[in-house]
Image (cartoon, rainbow, N blue to C red):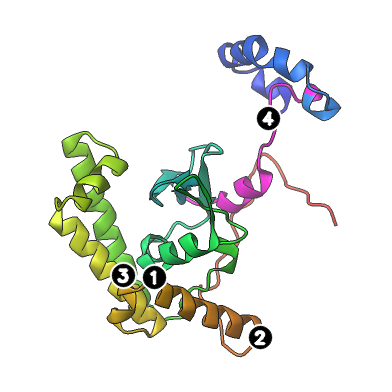
Amino acid sequence: MKLEEAGLYPAAIAVVRQRVRPRKDANRSADIRARWWQFTRPRGEMRAAVRGLDRFVTGTATGKRLILAWAKADVCPSNLVNAFAFDDDYAMGVLLSRVHESWARAQSSTLEDRLRYTPTSVFATFPWPSSDGDKRAQIGDIAKELIELRDKLSIERNIGLTKLYNECDEGAHKELSELHDQLDRAVADAYGWPPSVLSDPVEITSRLLVLNAAIAAGEQDYTPFPPLAPPPEPQSERLFLPD
């Protein structure tokens, strides 16, 4: 927002003026000092990517587990999560799968013993399956059921996803674990792989590397997503990008 727009929220701008502006005024960057009421790094590219979506996927940037969840469109994610500009159950299903997590663990760095999901080395290089509509629908249906069950269990037990999956590791929540297995098999099938591949993360990664190379060399048709309609342009502003 422009400062005059932000000033329409006097209680909020008063907090920013008191707690944030002193630090911004001490910054060496003239631009940061001039925009003292705005985020230092507003991530305009991310905001443009999720514009027009009702929800988007978020995932842990650093952690023992790669946990992915839906965020509503009005959520502003912190630097502790990655934001994926998808709102469909199919995309969530692929990202939740053992195939994607195996690639993430092979391509990411670590912080101590924790995964550090780096979008440039993981997401940008991850070769998605090019599958037909029926297989996409199957993955989406399983993912939707999985998320709904996961949310139900978390609410009933008043626990977060980390504790829920810790309990799964100990043998609890068999139905949730089975849905993850079903999802993994459906994603493997979308790649044209047998289910046996899922037991070996090295085999998964090797197959993805081969697919990645074939796509990069133009030897493999690659149409992982249907064409999307452009997001609606906001009525109150226009976005101008440099040439």
**Residue 168 vs residue 59, the one in the foreground:** 168
Residue 50 among magenta residues: yes
Disc on the earlier residue, 4 or 2 = 4
**Residue 114 vs residue 181, the one in the foreground:** 114
Of all residues shown, which one is farthest toward the bottom? 219
- Residue at 26% over, 63% down: 180
Distance (Cα) linking label 2 and label 1: 24 Å
Q: Which residue is mark 4?
A: 1
Amino acid type at image mark 4: Met
- Residue at 30% over, 43% down: 161
Q: Which residue is mark 1?
A: 201
- Label 3 or label 4, whichever lies nearer to me, is 3
Total tally of numbered discs in the picture: 4
Q: Is residue 138 something one can see in this rendering?
A: no
Q: Which residue is mark 2?
A: 217
Horizontal relation, residue 170 to residue 15: left or right: left
- Residue at 78% over, 51% down: 241
- Label 1 or label 4, whichever lies nearer to me, is 1
Disc on the earlier residue, 1 or 4 = 4
Residue 48 among magenta residues: yes
Distance (Cα) linking label 3 and label 1: 12 Å
> Where does the image place residue 74, in percent across and percent down from the top left?
49, 38
State the quadrant of the N terminus: top right
Disc on the earlier residue, 3 or 1 = 3
Q: Is residue 169 something one can see in this rendering?
A: yes
